[in-house]
Image: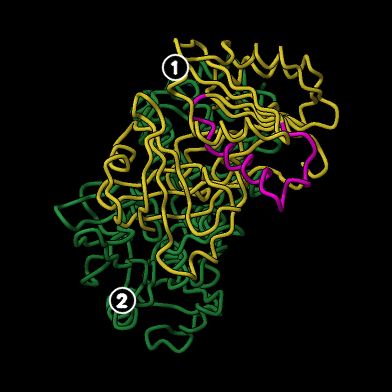
Chain colours: A yellow, B green
Amino acid sequence: MVVKGANVETSDRMLRTLELGFLNEEDAKAFQFTPGQFCELSILGKGEAPFGIASSPTENGSLKFTINKAGVVTTSLHHIEEGTEVGIRGPLGNGYPIDLFQGKNVLVIGGGFAFTTLRSLIAFFLHPTNRNRVKDITVVYGARMPGLLLYKEELAEWEKRNDIKLVVTVDQGDKDWKGKVGLVPNVLEEVAPTSENTFAVICGPPIMIKFTFPKLMALRFPNERIYTSLEKRMKCGIGKCGRCNIGHLYVCKDGPVFSYAQLEKLPKDY
Amino acid sequence: MKLKLDKKDFQPFLQNLMDEYDLFAPIRLADGVFAYKKIDQPEEVDLSASNTQKPAKEVFFPQSETMFRYERAGKEARITSTEGVERKRVILGARPCDIQAVCLIDQVFSGKEYTDVYYANKRDATTVIGMACNHPLSTCFCTSMKGGPFAREGSDLFLIDLGEAYLVELLTEKGTAFSQNEFLKKAGPNDLNLAKEIEEKASKKTDASMPVEGIDKKLDQMVENPFWEKVQEKCLGCRVCTYLCPTCHCFDIVDEALTNKGQRVRNWDSCLSTLYSLETSGHNPRPTNRERSRQRIMHKFNYFPKNFDQIACVGCGRCILYCPAGFDIRQTIKEIQKG
């Protein structure tokens, strides 16, 4: 694929969203994916790394990936110039179970830069052709500071809509911040969305997930209706190279999306 | 069909093979160290070792393998594929345990989900000439693991060393292609009787008493158990057991780059390495040797059976033979079963 554009997301400049275009019509048509799936992006000479797809299948013609600058591959992706060719393998993994969500309420809980595939999921359901697939959409999204929130323009647009309830919070505000201040699990408790007929989807740092699960339990969400997307070190992305296993399952091909009911039965290798 | 290959005809037989196939067979690297290599001269082939140090999986899944080469010009890139296999291949002299192991990892690389072309192309192009173990070692426990020193499963042809000659059994379609081979003669009743005698003797030598039945169920209950503390105390984390294991299939992928060209390579990797699961963020889901040595045992005796209905251990004994700390997986199996 070819780099069409890059957008710095956060005030610390560590997160950048790359927009990649297909090199030909055929590839664009053949690439069908579900929100929650990921791709292996590769820079020849540097290596390959997995990234969740941040764009929605409803945004045709290109793919978006939000990349945290952390290692060799991600640093090169941050420095990449427009027009450069990038290798891609995908879509990989299972994605969110959107068919299960049919006719239900969806509660999306996100923290920090793990919001990428959740953004794909929300944008997918907010698209006019898909909005009637699910009932109420509630989003609780938090970051450490206002500057670290992703997709700020889009959040502002969602804020204006009346078919989505959006609660954005930060751990610590600044002088311009007029929104909520508080940790995601606490804000969730405050918002107290109903668990009736509702699926919860969580994605965030492990510490946030750890403290959010008990809050969901308290709201009487059954384990079967809580989904999360996991990250592990990966190489092949297709269940051969071994390293991303949790018990007998591989995050790359059996995940990255798991229900809490599934995770409960597996070793805590994540 | 059972035929016979006189040892005086062995090298001409190999030369004849090499006219049609790329031949892979054990060669002697140093005292007691044998490995599978692509053969250039028939004299290199040495079948005298009980087994090679590195397993036969190497022929299909090399320790280090180029996945593709690339060249960059400005913002564009050109990729050259390296996955094709140009000639038909023969692997000769592989022991039953190693062949059983290749059949196990077939399920990972060319099973139901996502075919690994690098492995599958080599595997499809290869005729397997297995070889019976007349003298199993004290560390061998193949008979406990659904195998045996004379197990033919996975072989297209099977050799039994009769002293002056090899008995050659043609077992599959790929094997019967050799029925008209000029060096293979009809085997007589004496040859067959001798082979039977050797087989009976050898089968008694391997340990068939390992209690592996139901071990996967037992391990289901042992994920969080002080037992793993004991296991890790005996392990230095050197990883030799996983590199030499015929069923270990983990690999790493790295780019080797020069200025404008380079290659992507995959290399054997090991779950016992700290770096194996270390994430870029610094988080390591298997932070100590306890989790890592548990992963090694659980993968073979619990996770693999869950996915493929078979234990991923063939009893070749390499991990026992080469462990610098004297870790004995047979002991571990027994302790798990004792609970």
Q: Residue at x 43, y 27 (%)?
A: B327
The image shows a total of numbered marks equal to 2
Label 1 amino acid? Glu
Asked if residue A200 can be seen in this view, the reply is yes
Q: Position of residue B149 (x, y in %)?
A: 51, 54
Pointer 1 with pointer 2, Cβ within 8 A: no
Q: Looking at the image, which is closer to me, B293 or A89?
A: A89
Residue A150: within the magenta? no
Residue at x-position 67% and y-position 35%: A161
How packed mark 1 is, by other alpha carbons closer than 10 Å (few <14, some 14-19, many 20 or more), is: few
Q: What is the span of residues highlighted in magenta in the rendered image?
A: A112-137
A120 in the magenta segment:
yes
| Quadrant in which the N terminus of chain B appears | bottom right
Element at label 2: helix
Give percent across and percent down for residue B226.
Answer: 58, 14
* Foreground residue among B273 and B1: B273
The residue at the point 81 percent across, 23 percent down is: A194
Q: Nearer the viewer, residue A157 or B288?
A: A157
Q: Which residue is mark 2?
A: B14
Residue farthest to the left, as pictured: B259
What is the secondary structure assignment of the residue under circle 1?
helix
